Amino acid sequence: IYPVTAITRTGYTLSHFVVTSASEGSWVSGATVELNSALAGKWGNVTLSARWTAGNNAVSVNITNATANNPNSVASGEALSFTITPNPGYRIPDFIIVSINNAPSSDYTYKDGVVTIAEGVINGAVSITGSAVPNSYDVTITGSHTTVKAGNDESFATTTTYHATTSVQFTIQ
């Protein structure tokens, strides 16, 4: 008996083998194949082709001060796309960190809050982390008895403190 040693492919499960022999043609076996010397002598050279089933991989998105409409899992080899939406008072992260199968990955695009991982890239669990950025506002104070507003957005991520200095000029006559 010639055993086929255990083979693995990250993100996939071995479905079955296709066994091909010049004298016997091809047939499908299960996930294990046993060949003995008598059959090997009868069949001649035998080719084993593994067939794989894509496994489902967990998708974990942890973006501080934001939400994402990501799925909980994605099959190996499938594409993944979702949108990050910042909480009020925040804007989308400037950058994100993507890991696939516990390894950092640069095989993705991230633009305007949309994360896309192309077909054929995912072969294990997907983890995406980042942090939404607090909005910042430029404030200009002019005139006297001025009410200070920061644009049209009255929702602030944190307590906002304004500092104003006054300059008084005297003319002596």
Image (cartoon, grey):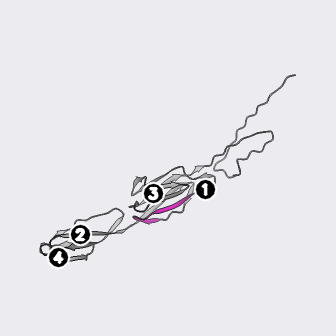
Q: Secondary structure at mark 2?
A: strand
Q: CA distance from mark 1 to mark 4?
A: 67 Å
Q: Which mark is nearer the camera, 2 or 4?
A: 4
The x and y percentages for residue 163 are 70, 38
Q: Could you say which disc has been placed on residue 23 in the image? A: 4
Q: CA distance from mark 3 to mark 2?
A: 35 Å
Name the residue tied to disc 2: 48
Indicate whether 23 appears above or below 109. Answer: below
Mark 3 crowd level (few <14, some 14–19, many ≥20, 10 Å Cα): some
In the image as oriented, which residue stretches furthest toward the front? 22
Indicate whether 139 appears above or below 44. Answer: above
Closer to the chain start, of discs 2 and 4, is: 4
Mark 1 crowd level (few <14, some 14–19, many ≥20, 10 Å Cα): some
Amino acid beneath label 3: Ser
Q: Is residue 83 magenta?
A: yes
| Residue pictured at 63% horizontal, 55% vertical | 88
Mark 4 crowd level (few <14, some 14–19, many ≥20, 10 Å Cα): few
Q: CA distance from mark 4 to mark 3?
A: 49 Å
Q: CA distance from mark 2 to mark 4?
A: 15 Å
Left/right of residue 28 with respect to residue 151 in the rendered view:
left
